[in-house]
Amino acid sequence: MVVSADILLLLAGAYLALGLFLGPWFIFRRLSFVDPALASAGVSLRFVLLFAAVGLWPIVLFASRRSAPGPTPAERRCDDRLARVHRLVWIVLAPASLAVILTGWAVSFSPLHASADDTRKAISP
């Protein structure tokens, strides 16, 4: 019975921790997207809503995801440009990093890379 109470307290603590993390994020970042009339809400109203957001964070998270605004056309163009640059960088960096790694691996096995002690051991009878 004690183990189940410990598990229940652990789950309640995890629920509260997530609520304490997501509640302020919702109140100060996403509230104006969910209800545009609350965009100019004062600090006192946001403080009152904070307790509800902490306690009801699954509903708050669902509401904020449904009301997320889409990117503007300018943001979409910027994202496309960044995606092209990212793709180009990876096309260049992937083979270059592979070449550096393989070169280092090949040099580590070459006889020129052997230490002086290894060379003396190989020469002595």
Image (cartoon, rainbow, N blue to C red):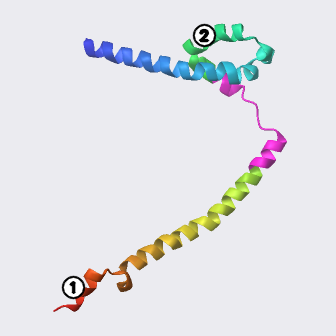
Q: Quadrant of the C terminus?
A: bottom left
Front of the two marks 1 and 2: 1
Q: Tell me if residue 35 comes above or below residue 106 in the rendering.
A: above
Is disc 2 surrounded by few (<14), some (14 to 19) or many (20+) residues within 10 Å? some
Q: Which residue is mark 1?
A: 121
Q: Tell me if residue 6 comes above or below residue 91 in the rendering.
A: above
In the image, what residue occupies the spot 60% across and 10% down?
A: 52
Q: Residue 43 location in percent, x, y?
A: 71, 11
Q: Quadrant of the N terminus?
A: top left
Q: Quadrant of residue 33?
A: top right
Kindly give the residue lying farthest to the left in the view shown.
Answer: 125
Q: Give the amino acid type for the residue marked by disc 1 in the picture.
A: Lys
Q: Residue 13 location in percent, x, y?
A: 43, 17
19 left or right of 112 in image? right
Q: Earlier in the sequence, mark 1 or mark 2?
A: 2
In the image, what residue occupies the spot 69% across and 12% down?
A: 46
In the image, what residue occupies the spot 57% across and 18% down?
A: 57
Q: Residue 71 location in percent, x, y?
A: 77, 38
In the image, what residue occupies the spot 47% across and 76% down?
A: 103
Magenta: main secondary structure:
helix
In the picture, the disc for residue 52 is 2
On whether residue 72 falls in the magenta region, the answer is yes
- What is the secondary structure assignment of the residue under circle 2? helix
19 left or right of 106 in image? right
On whether residue 50 falls in the magenta region, the answer is no
Q: Tell me if residue 94 comes above or below residue 5 in the rendering.
A: below
Front in this rendered view, residue 68 or 40:
40
43 left or right of 90 in image? right
- What is the secondary structure assignment of the residue under circle 1? helix
Q: Give the amino acid type for the residue marked by disc 2 in the picture.
A: Ala
Q: Residue 91 location in percent, x, y?
A: 64, 65
Q: Which residues are magenta?
A: 62-79
